Amino acid sequence: MGKKQKIVLPPELPPEISEDEIEVSDEDLQFVNDNRDYAGFVSTLDTQSITRHVNRVADVKEDALESLYEKRLKKKSLEKEKEENVLEVDRVDALPVKTLDGKLYYRTVPKVSQESENATSGDLDIGDHEADGVDKSLVKLTKVEKRAKLKRMKREAKKQPKEVAKVEEVQQAPQAVVLAEVEKEITAEEANERQKYKLAELGTALLMDPESNIKSLKEMLQISKEGDHSIAVLGLKSLLAVFKDIIPGYRIRLPTEKEQEMVVSQAVKKMRFYESTLLSVYKAYLQRLIALEKQSSFKRVAIRCICTLLDAVPHFNFRESLVAAVIQNISSPDDVVRKLCCATVKSLFTNEGKHGGEATVEVVQWIAEYVKAHDCQLHPDSIEVFMSLSCDEDLGRAEMPTANNKVRNKKTKKRKNFEDPQQLQESGKKKSRQELISKTRNEVNADFKAASFTQDVRERKRMQSETLSAVFQTFFRILKHTMLSMTARDKGISFE
């Protein structure tokens, strides 16, 4: 059997438009008038034969053609109904589909009309009445039935706005959530940028004029406490740079109560306020670093700041806190932290001119206590730092009294005893003046020694002896521990 031939209907003709509705521009008329030779063939066209040829379908009867045209009309009407009964999804919630011909089709959802629901409910009521064999138009409702009908109608009227509101909420919910998240991210980023600019402004002002802008230190410390992780790290680093630049080359001594009661000039008051503010903020900054050093997310940053401060300003106040924090991490399992601490200790040992040797004694004693507390269970790098220590073998030689000096002192004492009493009375006034001058000189020298880091020979000798005693104590403790461990190991092997 041969295949059934498919009937292809001719395409639809464009809709007929009256000549009054057609608008022709002046440019089109001018173009046709100028090119009459090219447009002359249009007037000679046989429109009837063309329409007959277009509408013709080969080997098909007229009844079959009519049925085909009816099917085409029904199909178009069904497509229109589908388009009317469908809701297009919001383009924000669903992406469109692009066909090969370049058209975009957006997702749709079937729309349940209220009229169809009402119609179905009405059909059910009619069906119930018809099942009873009674026509609804001929029967009058009783009072009870009327009340029930009114209640049902009120319930349906209340449900309709609720359903519409639910649909609107469902459509608006995803958009509102996305917008809220985006707004939060934007506000957080803007706040971080503002805090960064604020830190930069405050730091620049402090570096330019520390005495006038010393109050900005508190604000910078507050920003480093309130911000997120990145702002906190940036605040700690900014404060580190500022403190390295503005910390003076001497230890600050706050005035006593008696000194505060004294009347002083405005310059002295300003200097006292500057030093007290600097010292209080510096103390709070060190406490913040020591607290953050215990947190894993801030450990490296905090240790880096502590080591940098101890290396840059070992002479300043609160050095003991910095030394304690460095020694506690000198045997850290983290390679970065351990290398930072060891490098800082080595720098203190080699650059004693910054602190006069006092920091060296403190660090060596701290290491000795740390070795004792941990029973010698430390990383080798923590003991290797002793290799950077240096000792002065010529200490005390310049102060050794010679025999000639002793003889001379004895002779001068005898001469003074044999002098005349008149000469002694005349020279009494001169001695009193010389004593006053010598006292003032001694006070000035004492203040100068306290301000500078150059100790006398006795002080240097004392510090060197304390350093050597702590080093030998650590050395012999480690030797004793290794000997005990070796003997215990040998005994265990012999018993086996």
Image (tube, rainbow, N blue to C red):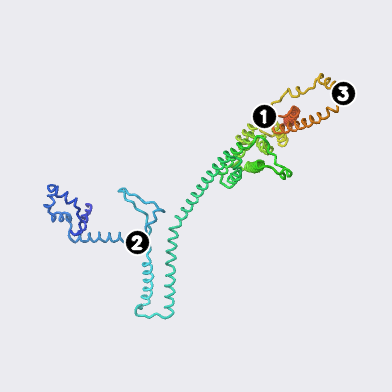
Q: Position of residue 149 (x, y in %)?
A: 42, 75
Amino acid under disc 2? Asn
For mark 1, what is the residue?
A: 353
Q: Which mark is residue 278?
A: none
**Residue 222 or residue 56, whichever sits in front:** 222
Q: Is residue 480 visible?
A: no
Query: Is 354 above or below relative to 237?
Result: above
Q: Which mark is residue 85?
A: 2
Amino acid under disc 3? Glu
Q: Position of residue 45 (x, y in %)?
A: 12, 52
Q: Secondary structure at mark 2?
A: loop
Q: Position of residue 414 (x, y in %)?
A: 87, 22
On the image, which quarter does residue 401 sit in? top right
From the viewer's perspective, is 267 left or right of 55?
A: right
Q: Which mark is residue 419?
A: 3
From the viewer's perspective, is 130 left or right of 65?
A: right
Q: Secondary structure at mark 1?
A: helix
Q: Position of residue 311 (x, y in %)?
A: 64, 33
Amino acid under disc 1? Gly
Q: Residue furthest left?
A: 44
